[in-house]
Amino acid sequence: MSQLIEDVLNVLREMRSHYAGEKRLDQISSLRGIAVRQVAGRRNIGISTIEDGLRRRLALVSVPDDFDPLAVSWLKNGNPDGLRAVLDRAAKDDTDKHLIRTFFEPSSDRPNIAAIDQTPKPARNSNTHGGTAVQKPIAIILDPDVAKVFSTDKKVNDVLRALIRISDKVNKH
């Protein structure tokens, strides 16, 4: 698997997870910028490295003029053909091609877990000197391409994210 394909798919994954029906190209460009910053931050690399992958290493002349319209076609119209073709040209091996193919498959074919323990419950809290506190609700949405954890408890978030990473590694093998 090439780092380029992994990075581009992660940018697209972030764009999809934040997409809220934006219709204008400038909104998609802004969404791409957010996604690039998130992916670069997770990899602890410069934003320009990811941007370079989106332009030069995908053999595009301009990200706003070439990549963003393909992203609009996919996000807004449900047509991934242009993005898939660009990524297929950049694929280095069969693993890359498999990742690209499965990334664009309809998510309705994939298992999801939605909403776990969304109701607040009373809990004993030593900080309240015998009183009760309310446990914050936790909701988890898992998808092979998008994993989100929502909780107000940092420790719970850390554990759930670690489990997601382990699950991703197991599913890759």
Image (spheres, helix red, strand yellow):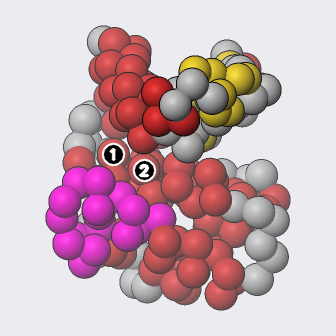
Which residue position holds label 1? 6
Q: In this rendering, is residue 10 above or below 27?
A: above
Could you tell me what secondary structure mostly forms the magenta stretch?
helix
Residue at the image point whose x is 73% and y is 23% from the top: 121
Q: Alpha-carbon neighbours of circle 2 within 10 Å: few (<14), some, or many (≥20)?
A: some
Q: Quadrant of the C terminus?
A: top left
Label 1 SS: helix
Q: Quadrant of residue 58?
A: bottom left
Is residue 159 or residue 30 the one in the foreground? 159
- Quick check: can you spot residue 71? yes
Give the label on residue 10, or none: 2
Q: Position of residue 117 (x, y in %)?
A: 71, 21
Q: In this rendering, is residue 94 above or below 21?
A: above
Range shown magenta: 35-50
Residue 67: in magenta span = no
Q: Quadrant of the N terminus?
A: top left
Residues under numbered marks 1 and 2 in contact, where contact means CB atoms less than 8 Å apart: yes
Amino acid type of the residue tagged 1 in the rendering: Glu
- 34 sits to left or right of 27: left
- 12 sits to left or right of 3: right
